[in-house]
Image: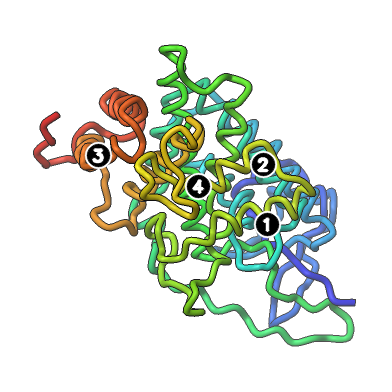
Amino acid sequence: MDVDYQPLPLDLVASLTELPFPVYLQRDGRMVLYATPGSDLSGALARSMAGLQVHVPAPDAGAMRRLLVVLFARALEARSEPVADRGRRAVDFAVALVGPLFGRERAIDPDAFFGAQAAIDLLSTALDVDPALGRAVLMGHPVGRDAPDAPEAPEAPVRPTPSLPVARRPGLRPTVEARRLTLRAIDGLVCAIALARSLGDDRRGVADRALLELGRGVAFRDVGLSRAVPADGKRPLHTARSGSTGDRSHPGLGVRLIVDALGAAPPWAPIVAGHHERLDGSGFPAGRQGDDLSRAVRIAGLADTFASLVAPAAWGHVRAADEAIGVLRLGARARFGDDLVWALVRVLESGQLLPLHRAGSVGATH
């Protein structure tokens, strides 16, 4: 019987003393057993070659996700480590756990969704408790590391053998596009939590009990984007470069995918459906405006705009707070409201998200 495999991120499980499941290597188009359960992981790593890709059988993928969630929690709680290191590791865990949701499959694996949701809840809570972590996460994937236009490495040809299972392309493996969308999801989450905290300081923000729902809605807002096909049938290039790709169906498609995965619409589904709506009615897909938009939906929209500004592949590519403030002042108040825009300006001026000025640049007047 054919068996699917999922890559195991060795760098994220390196703290383990032994393997909880078997792992395999792909050689000559087939999977070969590399280490058995209970094997010494440090020894397995020592035997590995540079760039070695180790795989876990699909039946063990759920156990691997749960293990990654536990290790992610430990990494976020490691306050003795420099915050920059925790930020980089948070990005790595997020890509491993959340990235599989941003594929092109017709459905989302419910087990993968629950793993991603647990990761987002952990990160949302950590960002709320430790504001400095937000900037570290944003700085955890600078230009160059993201490699927005890097081609995907070709996969080794698969040749069936009678003695070993066939290795098909893992449906949960994050592609280059999925990585882009994951980084946008995390950037938006960082902004949304910082914005909610800022609004909470004057007792007009998102209630504590709604913080996790906000985080989930913002993080999963674009799960339909990689699967959406415009009316002309042609998939847009570089779909993660902006929040508006010419296709306006992805919010509704995202909600349907999430409902199918969970079995019911979650309380935060309106955030996914409405994150492109705007106060002045200029948004999509429904063109809602004014009081029809909840504060959480407006926060999600502003966070999505911020994520587009800081994305390495974005037009203009904002890398400093003064640049972001300058862009936000150009019409953002009409689209999102004075309260949210000025709250984000205060967050940016505090240096929580980005350096105040780009090195060697002249800061914007504000």
Secondary structure state at the residue bearing disc 4:
helix
Using a 10 Å C-alpha cutoff, classify the residue at mark 1 as few (fewer than 14 neighbours), some (14 to 19) or many (20 or more): many
The residue singled out by tag 4 in the image is 185
The residue singled out by tag 3 in the image is 320
Who is closer to the viewer here, 314 or 4? Answer: 314
Looking at the picture, the colour scheme in use is rainbow
Q: Say which label, 4 or 2, has the lower sequence index.
A: 2
State the image coordinates of residue 31 (x, y, percent, origin top left): 76, 74
Using a 10 Å C-alpha cutoff, classify the residue at mark 2 as few (fewer than 14 neighbours), some (14 to 19) or many (20 or more): many
Which numbered disc covers residue 117?
Answer: 2
Measure the C-alpha gap from mark 3 to mark 2: 30 Å
Using a 10 Å C-alpha cutoff, classify the residue at mark 4 as few (fewer than 14 neighbours), some (14 to 19) or many (20 or more): many
Q: Which of labels 3 and 1 is toward the front?
A: 1
Q: Say which label, 3 or 1, has the lower sequence index.
A: 1
Residue type marked 3: Ala
Measure the C-alpha gap from mark 1 to mark 2: 14 Å
Is residue 201 visible from the viewing direction of this image?
A: yes
